[in-house]
Amino acid sequence: MDLGLVELDPDSTILFANPNLCKMSGYSIDELVGKKLYNVFSSGESRHFIKQKMYLREDGISEVYEFVTHNKKGEPRWWLVSGTPLLHHNGKFKGSLAICLDITQQKILEQELRKAKQQAEQSAHAKEVFLANMSHEIRTPMNAILGMGKQLQKTKMDSQQQFYLEAINNASANLLVIINDILDFSKIEAGKLSLENIDFRLSDVISKSVQIVMHKAEEKGLALAINSDPSIAPVLIGDPYRINQVLINLLTNSIKFTEKGSVTINCTVVKNSPDEQLLCVEVLDTGIGMSEEFQKQLFHKFMQEEDKNEKQYGGTGLGMSIVKELVELMHGDIKVKSKKHEGTSVILHIPFKKGAELNLNDKEKTTINADVLHAKRILLVEDNEMNRIVATIILNQYGAVVEEAVNGKDAVDKLYKNTYDLVLMDMRMPVMDGIEATKIIRNWITKETPVIALTANAVTGEQDKCIQAGMNDFLAKPFEEDQLIQVTAKWLNLTHHGNGSNKNEIMVEEQLFSIEKLKEISRGNRDFIAKMLNVFTRETQNSLDQLTQAYSNNDIKKINATAHRLKASVADMSVKSISEEIVQLEFFDDTKDDPAQLQQLLNKTNQVLTKVLEGIHNMLQENNY
């Protein structure tokens, strides 16, 4: 064995050393024998350490310990030493024996690993700080660009100006997608991305995803179809926002890489149990396809297929990697089938628990009175001038009186002197940031005034920092106009007390229908909106007539089919008040369900849609859209 051995007398004088010890130390046997052990292999504090070990041997104690010594050349060496006392037959101490193993290389490796670990931790921290800074620095001007774009859309423009604005908005939206992809992937890598677990309708999620990409498909003349298995549970439990993100990513890729033909979503039930369903969601296209070699690397981050189409199609190469990570976080799997010039099929298998209609947490589209913030004094704390302009324009439109502060110290000074109904507080500012300012406000000025965080930092943990500092809510930049007004209205409403007769009390009214989705799809093209409204009016009236006729003929299958056709268009127009009735009509079974219920469902559907059609007719007549 590669072990050194040394034998000592009771006074720690070396009596014997084997060749391995001589090799380890660099000394010859003649140079060692007769010398005190601690004089040869130690100095200073280490000499005291060795002497202490020798005293333990006299007490009959054996032990193993690590020890730093120097060889004859003066080079430091780590030894692992096993020391034991030597005794006469009568038990009297006569010396000791030490067996030594050179562990210098292991120690060097340990130190290198420890250093590498520290460097990795520092690198991870630096990456987190960089992402936070990048998120803030990019999202701050993005908020101004998108906000000003939305305000400009409200003004009258000629066709050329509208074209330029659409180009700006599209470029901004694409940049925001790239930023979100990078941040999402970083969250996934850090294990900090959490999923929602709420009740949702898969049909609504798919419909929303399709609506977002529909205009791109229409521009290329592609057919966009949805085939959904009727046995899919009406309500499932999962994260509809991340499912939407996955579908949009897959649909966007399919449309991007398909020049002619179609893109189809197929949804089927693979396994069905009383409490759970395993669903297969396939996104199928007739596009350019992929080589087998590239398919093996498809889910690697920053990977793109290198060919003549690279400049044409572009991208970050992060999308499919994020999709795979999200699907696996949902305990699902993803597979790809593709051939060059023959199209691509991306297949997801994801398990879902079955939900219940009663548990749906639908956030109805609401409209807020134009004067909902009338005379409300709001302190806007923001160091970026463009963002102050955007927020002030929006808030003024709803009647708010806005005063501005350029940093946290400025805000604290104003709050000492004046009273405000609400504070909108940016997180990162010079002189004093939002966290420090809020702590001062809560500790020394007021605990009642709502403070809403405005932050361009979308990394995990930012919201927790806001709440811990004493803020009431959190709004990430870039935010939509309705998001700002909704959160402001929400917290101003909480400051009211009494019987509700106050003229400044916030009134939130449920909206019968909305054309916001049409505006998003059309990018504000009024001719397209008018055309779609006329189509909806015509098709909906036909459907109502067919439902009436089918009910008279007791044709349940016709009622089911008509309701199924109505469901998508009603969802497009955000007619939320009868969404459940439409689903019940679609799956109504006269062998199981109460016939009296059918008449009630049809009556409510007819009443609501008749009002919707009247509203759309007035909108078209008044040219108010």
Image: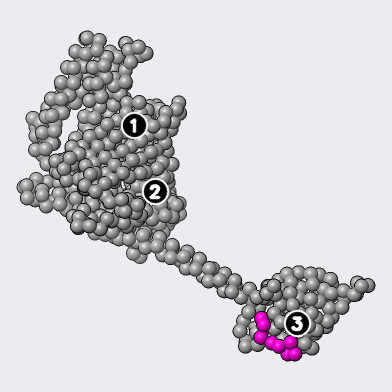
First to last magenta residue range: 23-31
Query: Dot 1 lies on which element?
Result: strand
The percent position of residue 322, horizontal first and vertical second, equals: 35, 50
The percent position of residue 160, horizontal first and vertical second, equals: 6, 50
Residue 24 colored in magenta in the image? yes
Q: Residues within 10 Å of mark 2 (few under 14, many from 20)?
A: some
- Dot in front, 1 or 2: 1
Residue closest to the eye, 309 or 577: 309
Q: Residues within 10 Å of mark 1 (few under 14, many from 20)?
A: some
Placement of 10 over or under 400, stated as above or below? below
Asked whether disc 1 touches disc 2, contact meaning CB atoms under 8 Å apart, the reply is no
Horizontal side, residue 354 vs residue 564: left or right: right
Q: Which residue is mark 1?
A: 268
Q: Amino acid at mark 3?
A: Ala
Asked whether disc 2 touches disc 3, contact meaning CB atoms under 8 Å apart, the reply is no
Please report the residue visible at 26 percent of the width from the left and 46 percent of the height from the top: 339
Q: Which residue is mark 3?
A: 17
Horizontal side, residue 158 vs residue 401: left or right: left
Placement of 45 over or under 474, stated as above or below? below
Overall secondary structure of the magenta stretch? Answer: helix
Q: Amino acid at mark 2?
A: Glu
The percent position of residue 583, horizontal first and vertical second, equals: 30, 24
Q: Is residue 478 visible?
A: no
Q: CA distance from mark 2 to mark 3?
A: 61 Å
User: Which mark identifies residue 112?
Assistant: none
Please report the residue visible at 82 percent of the width from the left and 73 percent of the height from the top: 85
Please report the residue visible at 19 percent of the width from the left and 47 percent of the height from the top: 150
Q: Which residue is mark 2?
A: 325
